[in-house]
Amino acid sequence: MAAYGLYSHIRANRIRSGFLLVGLFFLVYLMVFAGALVAEAFTHYDVALDQLLRFAQRDFIQALPFATVGAALWVVVAYYFHQSLIDAVTGGEDVSRAAEPRLYNLLENLCISRGIPMPKLKVVETDVLNAYSSGMNQKQYSVTVTRGLLDNLDDKEVEAVLGHELTHIRNGDVKMMVIAVVIAGVISFFAELFFRVMFRGGFRMRSSGDRKGGAGFAILIAVALVALAWLLSIVIRFALSRKREYLADAGSVELTKNPDAMISALRKIEGRGELPGSTSAIMEMCVDNPREGFSDIFATHPPVDSRVDALVKFAGGHDPGPLALPMPKDMRDDSDDDDEEESDETPRPQIPPPPDEKPKGPWGPKPFGRRRGGPWG
């Protein structure tokens, strides 16, 4: 079954997107309650734990509207300005047909063949090999590739990578990844705020540590809540199943009808896609994420070997194994010049001319030396 146009997968992604947004607000509320508990522990360090929990609950209810508005504003800002934030981190820049005719024509042909609105094109000027798509609606969708990918992949391989990213857009994976980036940003912000509050009040706790109360236990509970929020943010990110990469690979094959191009593109990108200065959230949006978690548990992408095996098994492709990148053009030109110089300096061997062939037989030349005896000798 072709991955491109799997309406069940698209519908599941929409449902997951809704759950991700709900999970975002839940994690924000959890972080706010932890902050309120720490604040009460610093203020009332000689109060029993149950009273501190009641005080924190009261503060949480008072702060709930502000936390909701803040999270909503974060979502709105991310919705309209996420592309600018991503471009600021990766260095992606818009390109036109005149600037990149090869890339523009490849993407345009794919979109025309399927009747898809053409997304914006961006290029990151780096030697690494990778690509990603982003956006929340048709007006925002964009596909970004690196200069290293354009220089080292041929047209068929670049077309396969573009088909992979178009499938992510079509299947709704891009929206989910942007929401995951928003969640990571919100949780990171509140976690930093939480620890700033702790360090700011830490001296007061140390100076009054001889008094009895439940402040110490309250601090431990707050730290546990922050750890839980961080863990749940990871779980929410992994709600974005790694199956999406298999489906995008299959969707690319359906678009291009060329599984070998997708396989060779993955083999060339493998281990060469680390975008300098990019966060883990952005790397999760790329074709390949070379960053691996502990024992592959926290890996956001399946291994390239597994993806290639799936294409060989289900799409009939051929795996060439790990591929070396082609020699850069300037180095090829230099080597060609060196070869020409060597060929000019090295004397060619002189081939002797063929001997003059004369007819053999009774009319041929007589042999030198002693003549043969006989009546005619």
Image: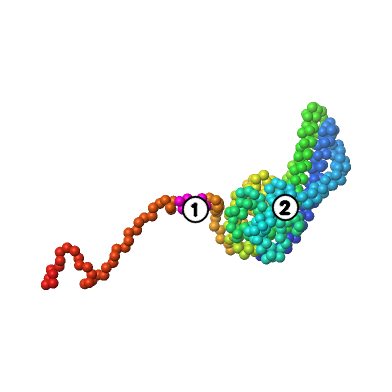
Q: Going 67% across and 66% down the picture, which residue do you hit?
A: 113
Q: Quadrant of the N terminus?
A: bottom right
Residue at the farthest left position: 375
Q: Is residue 314 above or below residue 83?
A: below
Amino acid of disc 1: Asp
Dot 2 or dot 1: first in sequence order is 2
Amino acid of disc 2: Met
Q: Quadrant of the C terminus?
A: bottom left
Q: What sort of colour scheme is used for the picture?
A: rainbow
Answer few, some or many: residues within 10 Å of disc 2's Cα (few below 14, many 20 plus, some between 14 and 19).
many
Q: CA distance from mark 2 to mark 1?
A: 46 Å
Q: Going 72% across and 49% down the picture, which residue do you hit?
A: 86
Q: Nearer the viewer, mark 2 or mark 1?
A: 1
Image coords of residue 351 (percent x, y): 34, 58
Q: Which residue is mark 2?
A: 177
Image coords of residue 116 (percent x, y): 71, 63
Are the residues tagged 2 and 1 within 8 Å (C-beta)?
A: no
Picture disc at residue 114:
none
To which quarter of the image does residue 169 belong? bottom right
Picture disc at residue 336:
1
Q: With 342 as the anchor, is 286 left or right in this view?
A: right
Magenta span: predominant SS is helix
Image coords of residue 158 (percent x, y): 62, 58
Answer few, some or many: residues within 10 Å of disc 1's Cα (few below 14, many 20 plus, some between 14 and 19).
few
To which quarter of the image does residue 194 belong? top right
Chain part drawn in magenta: 333-341
Q: Going 59% across and 56% down the picture, which residue do you hit?
A: 153
